[in-house]
Image (spheres, rainbow, N blue to C red):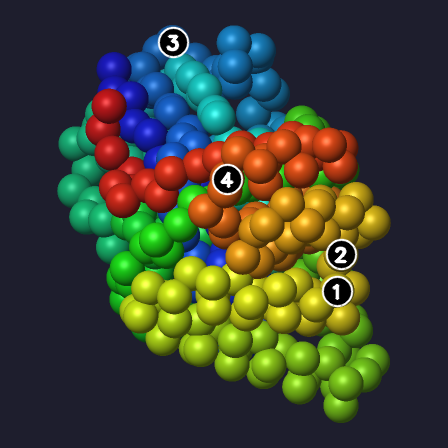
Amino acid sequence: MVTCSAPGKIYLFGEHAVVYGESAVACAVELRTRVTVVPAESTSITSGGQPLAIGEEPYIQNTLKIMEEFLALPPVSIRIDSEIPIAAGIGSSAALTVALLRALSIEFGVEMDLSLIAATAHRIERLVQGAASPTDTFVSTMGGVVVVPERRHLPPPGCKIVIGDAGIGTGAGAAMREKTGEMVLRVADLREAYPDAVDPVISAIGGLARSGVLLLEEGDCRGVGKLMNINHGLLEALGVGTTRLLRLVHAARDAGAFGAKITGAGGGGCMVALADNAREVAQGIERAGGKAMVVEIAQEGVRKE
Ligand code: PMV
């Protein structure tokens, strides 16, 4: 029996634009998915104590299929316990895939270093979602604050991170798990229809990520927050905002956050704020109808428990 855990992540900059090769900055957060694998008579899955049908779990199905490239995989019982809201922009699918790959590789003695875990998890996300950048899977595997495509670690922002869950686009079920792919497709359609308007937005987001890297290196949290606000406006321009997310973003800013934006694919799910006064910002988010979490940065990525 082996248990591994992997963290979720937030984007400080660059979701969606990263799909088109622009820079992005993501940060692993101390919300973990724990996966326990035990050799068994037949393969089964439980999540939070509830049984799941393998046919409805594309990330797990594809992970088991890909592990067959490394060994003849015997049946396993898979137990999932997750602190990460599902399909809400916090990288729940990446954390599940990374933790499961690591647990299976240790349990069955398959030599997989962290780079191979990250690359294999990215392959699985692509298989399930159609398009996926390597960001989520890399950050969940390695931990810390990372700029992509360079995959270089950056110093963490010297202020608190508050996540606000808007509640729409979250929950169990296959429709929710397709969300990221759907949102990526929506931006792709917009880009195809109006390339002259959308391409500059995408490259402006890349520019914000590059400027954000310099501010993080200088430890300028306030400046990072200002650029996050601009990034949020550009995500709205790409059509991935919702009324509820916008309300939480403004509630966080009104409560004194340095900056606040959507994190992840959008269309519901979560926003993220940087602040010194995390408690007040969390209260502001809750008053605006969101579920707030003050989270620590996860310096460590996937690990054996
Ligand atoms: O919502 P999440 O956590 O799956 O993040 C999606 C981020 C996108 O840039 C929209 C897609 C990707 O694969 O990078």
- The earlier-in-sequence mark between 2 and 4 is 2
Q: CA distance from mark 3 to mark 4?
A: 48 Å
Q: Quadrant of residue 3?
A: top left
Answer with left or right where residue 268 lies relative to residue 276.
right
- In the depicted structure, whether residue 60 falls above or below residue 77: below
Read off the residue under disc 3: 41
C-alpha distance separating marks 4 and 1: 24 Å
Q: Nearer the viewer, residue 132 or 108?
A: 132
Q: Are marks 4 and 1 in contact (CB under 8 Å)?
A: no
Q: Which residue is mark 2?
A: 241
Between discs 3 and 4, the one toward the N terminus:
3
Residue 148 horizontal/vertical position (percent): 39, 68
Amino acid on which disc 3 is placed: Glu
Q: Mark 3 or mark 2: name the one nearer the start of the chain.
A: 3
Which element carries disc 3, helix, strand or loop? loop
| Above or below: residue 88 compared with residue 220 | above
Three-letter amino acid code at the position of disc 2: Gly
The vertical placement of 30 against 2, above or below, is below
As measured in the structure, the alpha-carbon distance from the residue carrying label 3 to the one carrying label 1 is: 50 Å
Q: Earlier in the sequence, mark 3 or mark 1?
A: 3
At 16% across and 32% down in the image, what residue appears?
Answer: 109
Q: Are marks 2 and 1 in contact (CB under 8 Å)?
A: yes
Mark 1 lies on a secondary structure that is helix
Q: Could you tell me which residue is drawn at 36 percent across and 43 percent down? A: 297
Going by the numbered disc 1, the residue's amino acid type is Glu
Observer-side mark, 4 or 1, equals 4
- In the picture, measured across the screen, residue 33 lies left or right of residue 290, that is left
Q: Which mark is residue 278?
A: 4
Q: Is residue 138 visible?
A: no
Between marks 3 and 2 in the image, the one whose residue lies nearer the viewer: 2
| Residue corresponding to mark 1 | 236
